[in-house]
Structure formats: C-alpha cells, structure tokens
Image: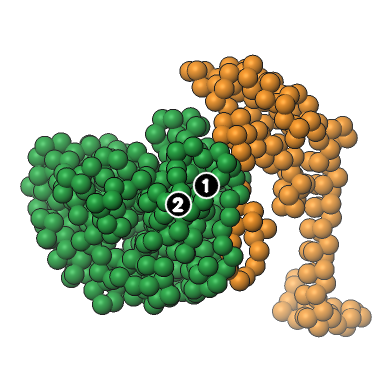
Amino acid sequence: MKAVCWHGPEDVRVERVADPRILNPRDAILRVTLTAICGSDLHLYNGYIPTMQAGDILGHEFMGEVVETGPAVTYRRVGERVVVPFPIACGRCAMCRSEQWSLCDNSNPNAHLAEALYGFSGAGLFGYSHLYGGYAGGQAEYVRVPFADVGPLPVPPDLSDEQVLFLSDILPTGYMAAENCGIQPGDVVAVWGCGPVGQFAIKSAYLLGAERVIAIDRVPERLRLAESAKAETLDYEGTDVVEELKQRTGGRGPDACIDAVGLEAHGTTPDALYDRAKHAVSLATDRPHVLRQAIQACRKGGTVSIPGVYGGFHDKVPFGAAFAKGLTLRMGQTHVHRYLRPLLARIQAGQLDPAAIISHRLRLDDAPRAYRVFRDKQEGCTKVVLRP
Amino acid sequence: MPTLHAASDSSERGFVEPPPRRVTELAWWALGVGGVALVGYGLVRRRRPLAPEVVARTVTVGVDPEAAARAWQADPASRQYDTPEFRPAPGGRGAEVTLRWASRVPTRGFAGLMAKSVGADPVTALAKALRRFKQQVEVGEVPTTDGQPRGAGRRPR
C-alpha cells in the first residue's frame, strides 16, 4: 500500500510499504477513504516531537471502511464506514471507565518511555511518535485500528466523509477546549490561534453560551474565517494583546482564554524572540509565548484552557500570575470518544458544518507538498484533506 | 625582601626550564580523566550490593485481589517472579499488586544509572512485567506494534 512516511524534519515521503495486518485479537483493518493533516502533525514535520524514527507512518485524523476484524472484535462489521478517534483506548481500564479516554492505562506499548519523561503514560496515539506508542498512522491506504469495538464510530450514510472526518480530532478538540472553560451566560472568551482547532473552539464557545468571542491571529484568511463565525478579531502584530484584551473587556480581562496554538507560537515580543533563540540552539522544545499571554490576560478567577500541544519544559511561564489570580488551568489530549456521538448529533442537526474549514482537497500522493503548503500557510491554506 | 627578579634568581640556582605549555595541559587532562575514572570505579564498587537488593514495584489492576491472584497463577510469564502481594485498592478500584525481586544489579547512584542506561535496571523490568500483567487482566491482550508496516529507514528498537 501507499503511506505517508516521516524521514526527518521537513522530509515526508509517500512510499510503498507492506499492508497492515491484525496483530492483536481486538484489531480491525480499515481501508482509508479520507484523511487529513493536523496542525499537530506540523510539530512532527518541523522536528519538535522526540522519538520519531525514519519510516514512521503519519496521520491521526482518518476514517474509512472496515475490511477485516480480529477474532475478539464483537461489534464492528466488515463493510462498516467508521470515523476513528486519534487516541487509542482499551475501554476497560479505570481511565477509560471514567471517560478519560486519552489517558488510557493500557494502549501505549512504549509506556515506559512516557513514564520516564512525564511520570505516567497517557494513551497510545496513531502516527504520533514512539513516545505515544509508535502506532502506524492513517495517512495511508490502509490502517490497523486496535480496540476496534471501543473507538471507531459508525457513520450514517446520509453524511459525507468530509462532514464527519474531523470528529477524529479537531472538532472534539475545539469543543473540549470550550467545554473546559466552564462558560457561563455573558462570558467573553479569547481564543489564540485561528487554525482549525481555534475555529472549532470559537463555534463551540458560542454553542456553549459565550456572549462574545475574541479571536487572535495574524493570518488574514484565518481572521476572516473567525469573523464569519461571528468572532471579534485581533491581529496580534503590532498590538499589545494583553492591554487590548483588557480594553475590550471593560478592564476585567476575558473570562476564559483558550490557547489553540501550543508549542510553536510565533510573536514579536521580547519573550517570543527569547523563545525562538532558545529553540534555534536546541535549548528548548516549546515556545510558550501564547500560554504566557493567556495567563497574563485572563481575568481574576478565570480559566485558561489549553488544547494546543506542549511537549517539554517551559521557561518563564508566569506561574505566579496564575496563582495570584486564582486561575483554573485545564488541558490535555482530547477525550475524543466522549464527544463522538454528541457532536455527530450536532452535525446532523446542522449546528456544525466541519467541512467548511477545508481549503485544500488533494491526493495522498501530494502529501509532501500538502505539508509544506499547510505549514507555510500558502495559498490561503486552512485545512488539507488527502484522499488515498 | 623579594624583588621583581626572583625568577631569574631561581634559574641561577639551577632550576630547569618548565616544559612547553602543551605538554603541561596534556598532563593535566590525563590526570583529570584518570581521576574521574577512579572515582566512577570506586562508586560502582561501593554501590555493588554484597547481598541481593530487594526492589519492589506496584500496579493497580481493575479486578478484586482474589481474581488478580488467580490471573497471576494462570499466567505462564509470571513464573519467573515470586508471588506478588495482592491487597484491595481504596475506593473499589480493584487490587494493588506489589511485586518484589531480589536483584544483584544495583539500582541507585552511579552504578544504578549505568544499569538503567543499558536496560539492565531491575525496577524497569518489574514495571514492564506488571504492566504486561495489567494489560492481560484488564483487556485480555498485550497491545503491540511489532509487525506493523513502516517505510524505509531504521527499525525501531
């Protein structure tokens, strides 16, 4: 089969590799019908996530048709069309039973690596480094899906692939980011990053009752997209973001701040330049410039919600400010399984149209160019889907 | 009373000229490397236990202690270890399983670090055995990626 393989920073290739096969009794094999490049794939593309190895198959946003099931699979049937959550969850451990699916105790075969770095291991993830299990990803013609009775959600025939694909990651991620804000009527929510997750966070914040959403970015087409979702926009270039947010919120600060950027934040402030310098000489993995702003800008007693991916150790994060203001910090990989059915219902009801953010529809063979275009935000790129 | 000409006075008393600077530096380096090696060797010797050191690791599995004990007895991979201790986990969270192992491989200090770096660390081995047991008990399989497809490039270790 063909698959998109990582070979090093800024080096992804479409290669012929062996077809996947059932390795555990609860596995299924899918023929991938649609897959996407996620913003967090760009952290792999840029070489900022450790424990990647040449030849690793990328991709954690995908859907397809079941073509084979393992002997212990009960509910999935060959021929079913399913969308697959990016965290791999066993469904039986204490974490899964408490619906904290992305923290599954049992699905990461390389848990010892994560334990050495983080103390404990979260769930295994598709196509996202050996730290998260080393599972082959779904930017391929076929993919093996462990615990096939637990994750994959059958898709109603009246919905297209494009309408449901983003249930695999970015739609639940944006929704959980807004849900983590504990939004109350009248709340103002600030969202840093108007990429796909930021866009879904904006829509979700309104769905959950926010009165105003302020979207912060610098890319014109992304700001326009946020405007079309009824967000007020703020171009951070040449603006003191913290002061501007205070001004726009009657001096209080936003009730909740969402960092939908993560470890590769851009910026022109001294702290952002300091991050870049450390990054350039490999003294840091993360550039937490947006996180600093969010903590600084958030109102007293407010919430900072962090769907953006971070991987390492943070320098100069104003934890004293978070403490002094009594902030609530909420974060983590998305518990996608928890949101699949409620969000599918919202799509069916016409409350959400995830396909609207797709700007590029390409073939799997075009993956190397697609990564470059998406990373560099060329051609007005907001989201790329790849059809094998 | 010392004068500014003390050095020339010394030469006059028959002192040899100091060796070239490069040779002196090399000597210092050799002394330093030798010293570090000696200290390291001493640490390893000092940390090597005369008697086996008992190490322990605990995991919580989502079944009651009796069921966990039965599963341990039935698992062929568990036979290389002593029987663990099974006790109820608080809050109805199943069983806490503590496995102990008398190991001659050091676990602490420099020697322990060296053992860990070459994968001979007994604590890591215990943790892997317990994780495997937990996976068998809770999901009936040990998730693996061995045998999955990958592109050209280095095989994962």
Marks 2/1: CA distance? 7 Å
Tint applied to chain B in the drawing: orange
Q: Which residue is drawn at 29% across and 47% down?
A: A156
Circles 2 and 1, Cβ within 8 Å, touching? The answer is yes
Chain shaded green = A
The amino acid pointed to by label 1 is Thr
Looking at the image, residue A73 lies above or below residue A360: above
Please tell me in which quadrant of the rendered image residue A220 appears: bottom left
Q: Which mark is residue A66?
A: 2
The amino acid pointed to by label 2 is Val
Closer to us: A225 or A118 = A225
Q: Which residue is drawn at 45% across and 43% down?
A: A76
Residue A212 at least partly seen: yes
Give the SS element for disc 2: strand
Q: Which residue is drawn at 82% across and 47% down?
A: B44
Residue A7 at least partly seen: no
